[in-house]
Image: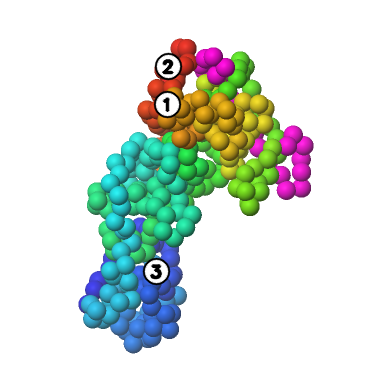
């Protein structure tokens, strides 16, 4: 017999939905048969699967260990064996974890065999005993915001269901401020807000920017503030007002100021100079600062906090050697 106590991440689910996740290799007919035969009971009573789960509910499973292992997929671990990676944790509480993602790592899987920052976060939570293998069968932490593979900086993940849901809602409502640090070619001397319409070509995974509204275009708004200058270079603090794929990269390129290191939207000739001199492989775009609004409830510890991610070493080196007196970095 195996006993499971319902935790906060399972509360509110239908019992059968919980069982489908737990017995991920089992057909639905098997689960309903086990309920009818009372091989699976809820709070020591026969259940039909329609019940809503409450905190500390007791689920008892009367099956052999071999049967449980077969239908839970034991041996196909939810935690991958990952290459060594030191996760840079910037903030953590019982519901949320915020990490500083290096460039070159996906935010989420694009293909089944991909390893993303989300897998590293799950591995970290298991290693630190914030999450058990049993809990992983019915709830997986997930990232709330995405960064391009070659963009570094702050990534938020929900450690609990309430954390994931609440943070996703905050991001959806755009009630938090997100600031990026980037280095562009050319000279920009004034704080400016630029607006436009973004259209994505799924075949090329590239976007185009138009000043006029188009049928497939999505409205975008980007605010930038110059905070440092060099020879044909400007260091910018960029506020992402709207959050579209490749928005900052394409928007700045559309006004003639491509990001250094960005071969998709920037100037290849300029990028080659920094590649040769510094070994720069990725665009110098860093998700730098997040300022949270007043938050009540489960995420109240984050209320009105400002979280800042350290700038990658290569980015800092290029700033130090090429930019005069940056005001904030």
Closer to the chain start, of discs 3 and 1, is 3
Circle 3: element type:
helix
Q: Quadrant of residue 8?
A: bottom left
Where residue 9 sits, quadrant-wise, is bottom left
Pinpoint residue 241: horizontal percent, then vertical percent: 59, 34
Q: Quadrant of the C terminus?
A: top left
Residue placed at 33% from the left, 76% from the top? 71
Q: Which mark is residue 144?
A: none
How far apart are the two marked residues, 2 and 3, measured between alpha carbons? Answer: 53 Å
Asked if the residues shown at circle 1 and circle 2 are in contact, with their CB atoms under 8 angstroms apart, the answer is: no
Which residue is disc 1 drawn over?
278
Above or below, 322 against 80 in this view is above
Find the distance from the CA under tag 1 to the CA under tag 2: 11 Å
Magenta-colored span = 210-233
Disc 2: which residue: 321
Q: Secondary structure at mark 2?
A: helix
Instruction: Choose between 178 and 167: the one closer to the eye.
Output: 178
Per the image, label 1 sits on a secondary structure element best described as helix
Residue 21's disc number: 3
Camera sees residue 266: yes
């Amino acid at each position: 017999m195996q006993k499971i106590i319902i935790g906060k991440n399972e509360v509110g689910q239908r019992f059968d939905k919980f069982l489908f996740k737990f017995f991920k290799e089992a057909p639905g007919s098997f689960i309903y048969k086990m309920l009818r035969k009372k091989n699976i009971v809820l709070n020591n009573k026969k259940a039909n699967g329609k019940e809503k789960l409450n905190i500390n509910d007791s689920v008892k499973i009367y099956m052999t260990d071999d049967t449980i292992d077969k239908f839970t997929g034991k041996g196909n671990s939810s935690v991958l064996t990952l290459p060594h990676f030191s996760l840079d944790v910037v903030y953590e509480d019982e519901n949320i974890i915020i990490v500083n993602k290096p460039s070159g790592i996906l935010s989420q899987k694009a293909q089944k065999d991909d390893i993303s920052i989300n897998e590293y976060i799950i591995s970290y939570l298991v290693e630190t005993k914030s999450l058990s293998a049993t809990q992983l069968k019915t709830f997986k932490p997930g990232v709330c915001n995405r960064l391009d593979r070659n963009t570094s900086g702050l990534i938020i993940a929900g450690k609990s269901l309430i954390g994931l849901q609440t943070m996703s809602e905050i991001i959806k409502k755009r009630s938090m401020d997100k600031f990026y640090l980037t280095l562009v070619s050319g000279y920009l001397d004034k704080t400016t807000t630029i607006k436009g319409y973004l259209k994505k070509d799924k075949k090329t995974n590239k976007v185009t920017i138009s000043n006029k509204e188009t049928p497939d275009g999505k409205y975008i708004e980007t605010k930038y503030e110059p905070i440092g200058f060099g020879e044909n270079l400007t260091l910018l603090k960029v506020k992402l007002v709207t959050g579209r794929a490749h928005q900052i990269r394409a928007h700045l390129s559309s006004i003639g100021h491509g990001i250094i290191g960005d071969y998709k939207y920037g100037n290849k000739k300029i990028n080659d100079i920094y590649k040769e001199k510094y070994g720069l492989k990725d665009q110098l775009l860093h998700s730098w600062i997040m300022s949270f609004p007043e938050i009540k409830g489960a995420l109240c510890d984050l209320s009105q906090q400002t979280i800042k991610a350290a700038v990658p070493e290569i980015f800092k080196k290029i700033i130090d050697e090429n930019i005069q007196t940056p005001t904030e970095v």
